[in-house]
Image: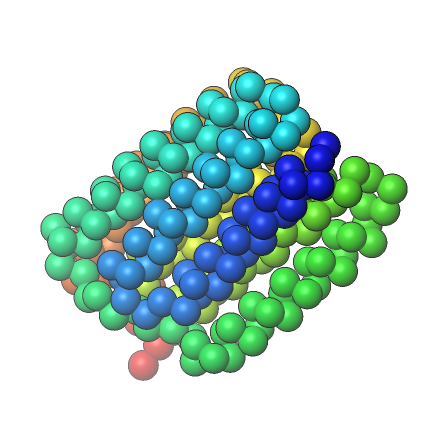
Amino acid sequence: MSALTFDIAHLLAGSLVLVSFLLLYQDRLYALLNVYALHALVLATAVAWQAYAQDAPQLYITAAIALLFKAIVIPVALHRIIVKLGIQRHIETVGGIGSTMLLGMGLVALAMVVTLRATEGADLLAREDLAFALAVVLLGLLMMVTRRNAVSQVVGFMSLENGLVLAATGAKGMPFVVEISVAFSILIAFIVIGIFLFRIRERFDTVDVGALDLHRGEGR
């Protein structure tokens, strides 16, 4: 692999981590969905470049799936759900944005240290892709924990899954059947999540997950 090919792969994987931080920074739903579409676009580009670098044509299918479903279909569908349900556009967070970003930087450092030490002797590109992928996964988990809005938690879950796809492609690709099963799993999960959001809105007149605690009598 040439130095330029390696550098571009490294840049794209690092860009996915950067966009994950942009997701954490957003406090408006529409901006969050737009940034998620960018997140999926960067993922699709990174996977396509891995297909070229590894000479693995099946990864182009993974890139196309990410581009079609994650960068276009899912963000558009979530936009329509927000409009239809009349969901509040502002995203409530647990703690401030600044503290969340600092915690995110700590998680990225942890991902780098753990992955690079655990994969000594492995291919350099695979090691770095796995480190970046773990960082994306941890940032997605952080977003799910620190957001009270159900839609933003859904976006956090999908960004986490983007990190898993990056990890799988960086580790010399996935079998074709796995790619197809992952794509259908994402689609089914999105349909279930959409029904879940409609039911929450219908029952509690909000998608703030704090309403569930109030309903159980755990809040005041």
Residue at 63% of width from left, 22% of height from top?
55
Residue 3 in the figure: left or right of residue 121: left
Tell me what residue is drawn at x 46 percent, y 37 percent.
Answer: 44
On screen, residue 13 above or below 56 = below
> At which x and y percent is residue 135?
61, 56
Q: Kindly indicate the quadrant of the structure image that contains residue 23.
A: bottom left
Res 154 seen here: no
Residue 83, percent from left and from top: 13, 53
Question: Which quadrant, please, contains the C terminus?
Answer: bottom left
Residue 189, given in percent of the width and then of the height, sits at 38, 37
Between residue 63 and residue 80, name the one nearer to us.
Answer: 63
Seen at 71% across and 41% down, the residue is: 3
Q: Residue furthest right?
A: 121
Q: Tell me where residue 89 sits by quadrant.
A: bottom left
- Which residue is pictured at 64% across the width and 70% down the height? 106
Label count reads 0
| Residue 49 showing in the rendered view | yes
Question: Which quadrant of the view contains residue 111?
Answer: bottom right
Q: Is residue 182 above or below residue 113?
A: above
Q: Position of residue 134 (x, y in %)?
A: 63, 51
Q: How is the image coloured?
A: rainbow
- Left or right: residue 24 compared with residue 124: left
